[in-house]
Image (tube, rainbow, N blue to C red):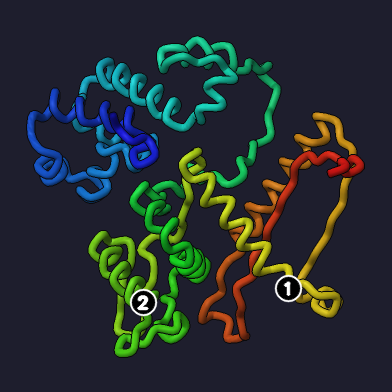
Amino acid sequence: MEDITKNPYLEMGKLLKSWRQNQFSASAVKLCDTAGFSFPYRVYSAFERGEQLPSTDTLFEIASYYWKETTELNKNMGIALKTWTWAQLSNSLKNRLKLQSIENLPSLLAQLTPTYDAEETTETEIDSNSIPPAEFDNTWVYSASERNLFVKNPWLLDILVRMAATFPDELSFVELGIDKWLASDAQKTLLAQIQTWVKEERMVESKTGIRLTLPHIHIPKTEAWDDLRKHIVQTGVEVLLPQITPESVKKKNSHRTNYTRVLTEEQKKDWVKKLAKMEMDYAHTPYLGKKDPTPKKPYMMLVLFASREMKLPRKK
């Protein structure tokens, strides 16, 4: 049985493999060499293994190589998009929507598709913690291999977050605290992993430091990654709380707030939208780098919003 925690997009991988075997009849390496895709073999290989989910534009690029005739292209893209959508639904959501298989998707989507009057306009929805379509090809979406690595060495994720925050500038070995001649076990792990990521074209290494090849990083919003996401939040709380002192708040070096309000369903949705917008605004704050010589520090914004019960404690 396949391990879906290591291959969360297995159905999409099986579809791509069937396309290659039926339409090309050769290896994945040969396909990538012949097709001249905009992405390297290592990326396509991760797609087929179900470790990474291709963007819809990438799916179209692959399908367009196999099918030139519009009817066949549209037919197979329809199948691919259905599989792509299914791959992103959590098991809990599938259960709540009573989706037994991927074949149930078309009828559900037909029910959910909104209709608008000709003059009606809609506000663009901001999906918190998602990748904007225009940035997908500029984003390193972590796969199962990275997840296993981060579980063992969560500090590696912190370093990648720091590198993304300072893109396109490199992060120097001095800033990382690395001495190549007197390396600790953690430093040896990092140095070895840097070489792997350089070979995979995830990073570029110079004599003085390293930088990412893509400006964005993304942790998949799947159940397999949920424990790691919780770990990031818990670590953030542990790191930030000691720094948020009354003096720090007074000097406007930090911010802390805690409000509880009783909200209706619509009020709750409205605030989730507002918080998502604030998140995206902060995420897209430009890094000034060498253009601005003033001192800079990494700042973490941690936003938590959920319902809570407020009752007397139970007697033990």
Kind of residue sitting beneath label 1: Pro
Identity of the residue furthest to the front in this view = 316
Mark 1 surroundings: few (<14), some (14-19) or many (≥20) residues within 10 A: few
Q: Residue at x 30, y 89 (%)?
A: 181
Q: Residue at x 75, y 35 (%)?
A: 269
Q: Is residue 117 above or below residue 188?
A: above
Mark closer to the chain start, 2 or 1: 2
Q: Does the residue at mark 2 contact the one at mark 1 (Cβ under 8 Å)?
A: no
Q: Secondary structure at mark 2?
A: helix
Total number of numbered labels? 2
- Residue 48 in view in this figure: yes
Q: Residue at x 17, y 45 (%)?
A: 36
The residue singled out by tag 1 in the image is 242
The residue singled out by tag 2 in the image is 185
Point out residue 115 in the picture as x, y percentages from the top left corner: 63, 15
- Residue 57 in view in this figure: no
Q: Is residue 34 above or below residue 193?
A: above
Q: Secondary structure at mark 1?
A: helix
Kind of residue sitting beneath label 2: Asp
Point out residue 48 in the picture as x, y percentages from the top left corner: 25, 37
Mark 2 surroundings: few (<14), some (14-19) or many (≥20) residues within 10 A: few
- The residue nearer to you, when weighing 131 against 63, is 131
Q: In the rendered view, does 304 fall on the left or right side of 87?
A: right
Q: In the rendered view, does 200 fall on the left or right side of 98?
A: left
Q: Nearer the viewer, mark 2 or mark 1?
A: 2
Point out residue 291 in the picture as x, y percentages from the top left corner: 54, 80
Point out residue 233 in the picture as x, y percentages from the top left corner: 62, 56
